Amino acid sequence: MQVGAITVKMTKQGIKNGFLHGWAVGIGGMTVDYILIFALYFGLAKVLVIPFIQMPLWVIRAFFLFFLIYDSIKNLIKILLWKARKLINHSLKHSEKLFLQGI
């Protein structure tokens, strides 16, 4: 399976909310793919090769990919901070327990 925007979103939803949510994102992406295939078959391809149309699409794609990057980095930082807090709390509880035991 290629790693794309839908695959990333499916994986995030699956990890965060469970299999059915990730599966629903995948079904939605597949539905949009089929709609695009039919639209291309019935004449949309002739419109999409016009340079006047291509430029805004490139800009929209670039913003979308930058948003995905920003969102992924933001979530990574949130997870790393959560793990660091958990580790610090565990260390403090363990050291307090050792201190109270007199070691």
Image (cartoon, rainbow, N blue to C red):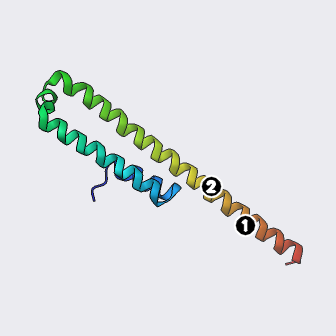
Q: CA distance from mark 2 to mark 1?
A: 14 Å
| Residue drawn at the location 29% of the way across and 29% of the way down | 59
Report which quarter residue 67 is drawn in.
top left
Image spot of residue 66 (x, y percent): 38, 38
Q: Is residue 41 left or right of residue 71?
A: left
* Residue 23 figure quarter: bottom left
- Give the number of the mark in front: 2 or 1: 2
Query: In the displayed structure, does residue 30 sit left or right of residue 93?
Result: left
Against 51, is 91 above or below? below
Pick the quarter of the image with the C terminus.
bottom right
Label number found at residue 91: 1
Q: Amino acid at mark 2?
A: Trp
The three-letter code of the residue at mark 1 reads Ser
User: Pointer 2: residues within 10 angstroms few (<14), some, or many (20+)?
Assistant: few
The circle on residue 20 is none
Residue at point 25% right, 44% down? 33
- How many marks can you see? 2
**Secondary element at image label 2:** helix
Asked whether the beta carbons under mark 2 and mark 1 sit within 8 Å of each other, the answer is no
Q: Residue at x 47, y 43 (%)?
A: 71
User: Quick one: label 2 or label 1, which is nearer the N terminus?
Assistant: 2
Which residue bears the numbered disc 2?
82
List x then y, in percent, for residue 75: 52, 48
Residue 63 image offset from top left, x and y in percent: 36, 33
Q: Quadrant of residue 88?
A: bottom right
